[in-house]
Amino acid sequence: MSDLEARLQQLETQTQSAISQISNSAELETTRVAFFGKKSDLTQILRGMGGVPAEDRPRIGQLVNEVKARLESAFDARKTEILSAQLDQKLAGETIDVTLPAPDIHFGRRHPLTQTLDDIVRIFSNLGFSVVEGPEVENVYYNFDALNIGPDHPARYERDTLYVSDDVVLRTETSSVQIRVLENRQPPVKIIAPGRVYRREAVDRTHGAMFQQVEGLCVAEGVTFGDLKGTISTFLAQLFEAAPGSGGVQTRFRPHFFPFTEPSAEFDVLFNGKWLELGGCGMVHPKVLENVGVDPEKYTGFAFGFGIERLAMIKFGIDDLRLFYENDLRFLEQF
Ligand code: DAH
């Protein structure tokens, strides 16, 4: 074996071991330059081939080429290993854990009273009622006189009513809207009037100094108490989502007195085994019709009014109406 062959063999062993120890891309580069670059031993040997005796040249030339090819393919294999290990490491670092809980997305929601009112409007719209509104600061005439509430009726006393002046009050009931509507329209009239009302009440679980009512009014020829009962029963069944025909929601009517209706009744719903009062109703008093220029011989009508908070309390199982107005997110986010 010539010196050159011995040198090549040694170079191959040395280079193979250097390649096998490469552990990162920086070392890849230094190894490439050291063993394959212009100044490397291998390049020197190739350049020196001219000095090899002619009879040895083919053999040694072939050997050099074989050594070079083996080293290059060992280097390429190591390079591939290192690059793919690097890629694996990078991918592992970027892994997304799809089982992690998603960040909490906060959606706004409708207030339970708004939800209840939206239901009320939807159900009555389907029954042919349109929605009207009236002023919260109201003349005594609309709040009392025209509704046949006499000058000595206790509801007028200051302990119940918030007076703005002698003739002006914060309305104590949405019934005032009945008068405003009938003043401007001839029957047939079929409206509901939702809105805020105000009373000098001590605030507790079931009473507020401000609360919301929905008034209903239907005046036409031949309207009867049966129409009133059917309307209210249908409404309550739909609001509390009793399946039709299931006998679900039970309602009852009790005789009562209101100055603006005759006969009058209060209606209750059976809730958790107890009768709960929801509101008042009756056939519009002939005097009220006369007050607005509607002929009571020709037309009859029914009216009703109930508290929206009460309906929402039953619908959502809430036992304190003050919660509706405290804007506590822990409460509001439950609906
Ligand atoms: N306005 C009555 C109240 O606030 C409720 C009411 C009773 C309204 C009978 C009516 C009615 O329209 O006919 O207590």
Image (cartoon, rainbow, N blue to C red):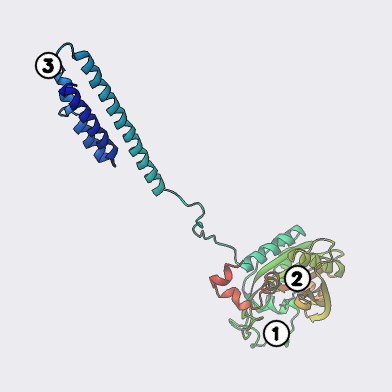
The CA span between labels 1 and 2 is 22 Å
The CA span between labels 3 and 2 is 129 Å
Tell me the number on the disc at residue 292: 2
In the displayed orientation, state which residue is furthest to the top: 55
**Residue at x-position 64% and y-position 88%:** 159
Q: Can you identify the residue that label 1 sits on?
A: 155
Choose between 221 and 124: the one closer to the eye.
124
Category of crowding for the residue at label 1, using alpha-carbon neighbours closer than 10 angstroms: few (below 14), some (14–19), many (at least 20): some
Q: Is residue 278 left or right of residue 23?
A: right
Please state which amino acid type lies under the numbered disc 1.
Ala
Category of crowding for the residue at label 3, using alpha-carbon neighbours closer than 10 angstroms: few (below 14), some (14–19), many (at least 20): few
- Mark 1 or 3, which is nearer the eye? 3
Q: Quadrant of residue 263?
A: bottom right
Q: Quadrant of residue 241?
A: bottom right
Res 263 visible: no
Secondary structure of the residue carrying numbered label 3: helix
Q: Earlier in the sequence, mark 1 or mark 3?
A: 3
Q: Is residue 220 left or right of residue 335?
A: right
x and y percentages locating residue 291 in the rendered image: 76, 74
In the displayed orientation, state which residue is furthest to the front: 1
Q: Earlier in the sequence, mark 1 or mark 2?
A: 1
Q: Earlier in the sequence, mark 3 or mark 2?
A: 3
Q: Can you identify the residue that label 3 sits on?
A: 51
- Mark 1 or 2, which is nearer the eye? 1
Q: Quadrant of residue 169?
A: bottom right
Please state which amino acid type lies under the numbered disc 3.
Gly
**Residue at x-position 69% and y-position 63%:** 119
Mark 3 touching mark 2, by CB under 8 A?
A: no
